[in-house]
Image: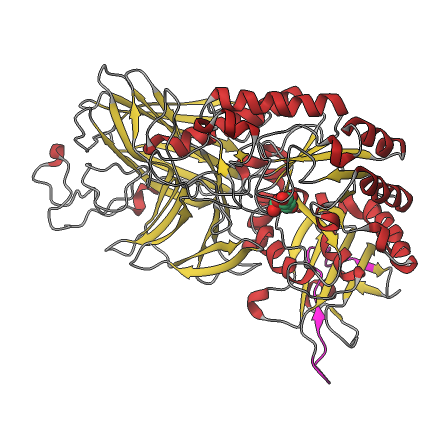
Amino acid sequence: MELITLNTKNTTYQIGVEPNGFLLHLYYGARTEGDMSTLLTRYFRGNNGVPYDHKGDGTYSADSLPQEYSCYGSGDYRNHALRMADASGVQGADFRYQSHRFYEGKAEIPGLPSSYGKEGVGSCEIILTDARLQAELTLTYGIFYEEDVITRSVSVKNTGEQALWLDKIMSMSMDFLTGEYQLIHFWGRHFNEMNTEITPVGHELVSIGSRRGVSGHQHNPFVILAQKECGEEYGSCYGISLVYSGNFTIQAEQDQYCQTRIQAGLSDEMFHYPLAAKETFYTPEVLLAYSADGLTRLSQIYHAFIRDHICRGRFQHIRRPILVNNWEATYFDFTGEKLVEIAREAADLGIEMFVLDDGWFGSRGPDDRGLGDWVVNEKKMGGTLDSVVKKIKSLGLQFGIWFEPEMVNEDSDLYRAHPDWALTIPGKPPVLGRTQLVLDFSRKEVRDAIFAQMTAVIDSTQVDYIKVDMNRSICEAYSYGADYQNFGTLCYRYMLGVYEFFERLTKRYPDLLIEGCSSGGARFDAGLMCYTPQIWASDNTDAIERLNIQYGISFGYPVSVIGSHISAVPNHQNGRITEIDTRAAVAMSGNFGYELDLTKLSGEEKDKIRHQIADFTEHWELIHHGLYYRDSSPLEQKEYCAWNYTSPDRTEALLTVITTNTRANSPVSYVRCRGLDRDAMYRCDETGFSYSGNILSSIGIPLPIVPGEYHAFRFHFKKED
Ligand code: GLA
């Protein structure tokens, strides 16, 4: 058997090419030498799933061998990765290996965002063909050696003259010969994203995904397949992060021989894609990582990778401006004068940017009208936008503004002029979300019209930042455009349109900071992060609920992509009252900002804000670029929630603790601070004591007992000489 071996610094991935042209998945895990086909067995499997060229050999079963990319029709009856049909709709494929090659660097995926890298990055491409379908399948692997990440994507080309049909095409599929696994995944809803759930993978399909046209609040397209015993600091685990923001599916199950298969890629629901002669279809990319040392290491691989090989542009590595956003301060009830008042306070406090949220355009406010008309409402603003922006900028602030380009209200000039630009189904009243419809971004003319409106505003007012929102899901997958009428193509084409739109924006404005948003975290994925180096993680700004959301996010995404603000109390979403220090400690674990009416604060609160801004500015490098450690789990229902950042050279660490459950005469909580040099001593700014790195890492420090809940503690440790 010919072997194709991909090595990163600490991992090995091996594929075997059978003499019959089948590709077998031999191994993915800790770096290993040798031929892993020795793990394969050929037992009699009831003479089932035998490819024709093995006729008579009952020990060769495609249904039990570990497949690298299983196709429907090959004799593998398990959950397959590819299902294709010929022009007359006859499903069944038989792809066989033709060739493979390694090359330096990493190719882009046409129309789709993907990871990038230059030095030390290589790729491998395996080509298979199907003689009946006249199609060519390419499996592409990116090998990030230092980063310990392997990427996968797939393309299929129709090399014949007849149209073909794609009914399922996963970005990756992987088989494990042995082991008991559980799937760690992240579910949620609006205001309550990224809850961590652990589901054992047994003999039924564990399946998460989205059929909403966006990746969604309900399931995040990042999962971990972990060995049963895996914890933060020990055990084997695999991460799968999909670089895609639309309909997806991730599925895992054990087969009849207790082998585990996991797959990730485009959802095959609402997918029925005609592949014209000579056309090539590209799947989104997945980012795979493996840790032999538990979940912390796996998360740190993703943190560094998303920061360095997914995010891009001027703001990739620099501190983003500390902002104040007027949404929770005013909602729609503002005037230009009110905005300037808030901005004046902001400038006085040391805030660096003012962001004007929803409500500044067309007939907007309330939220059942105006989307689609990106023309300044000068009556409301009391003059041109430019005049207001000039006043704000003269205070020394930068200026940002909100858009929701993919949406339209029926009550808008755009909809009245172009009702066919919205996704609706002829003869069926459309389903509404926040009284709005989705614009057909699969159509270039629609994107062009919105792009022209947006750029007119951005250009005329010299905007420094935009928040790009997307506040409803797609329900009517029907296009009135000339090309894409089909429900089976629309959601994919829509995403290609959205990505093309972001590509254009980022190319035209390389210095513009773009924050993604989708009713908070409904499009919080590595796909969007290729364009927006930060994403508003949730519309829930309550510090305590955010602990759980930001905990979930930390498994697959770095702190530097999270948008996180201090808002007013009682909190607008749940009515909870927390101290401003607690709100600050949580909001600083992200791109720090404020979202409240600064003109209504007390003198004491203003002093605290000045202090917070200085504090964040001092520590942001450690927070954004340090190694992130979870020091507690909400799943364990401890008395506190804690996490720390440790500088890569281990000379410094910042530990944050929030008490979440107060009890009288309670046992002492010892909170660990991880990642330190165990042989060194560290001095703590707050307690004034010196601690050994070993004790901080293994036992921790005792928390003072403070009455009341939701108290924040911060401990900054510096290595002693
Ligand atoms: C969404 C966003 C909020 C805010 C509102 C404005 O809900 O997530 O942050 O921008 O829209 O309508």
Q: Residue 239: x percent and y percent? A: 49, 47
What residue appears at the point 22 percent right and 18 percent down from the top-left corner?
Answer: 162
> Quadrant of residue 18 in the image?
top left
Horizontal side, residue 680 vs residue 430: left or right: right
Residue 492 at x, y percent in the picture: 41, 32
How far across and how far down the image is residue 701, in percent?
A: 76, 69
View quadrant of ligand 1: top right
**In-front residue for pair 446/588:** 446
In this view, the residue in front, 278 or 378, is 378
Question: Over which residues does the magenta segment extend?
Answer: 663-682
Residue placed farthest to the left in the image? 56
The answer to whether residue 36 shows anywhere in this view is: yes
Most common SS among magenta residues: loop
The residue at the point 59 percent across, 23 percent down is 451
Q: Is residue 350 magenta?
A: no
| Residue at 57% in and 31% down | 372
**In the rendered image, which quarter is residue 355 located in?**
top right
In the rendered image of this protein, does residue 494 appear above or below residue 540? Answer: above
> On the rendered image, what quadrant is the N terminus found in?
top left
Answer left or right for 392 relative to 562.
right
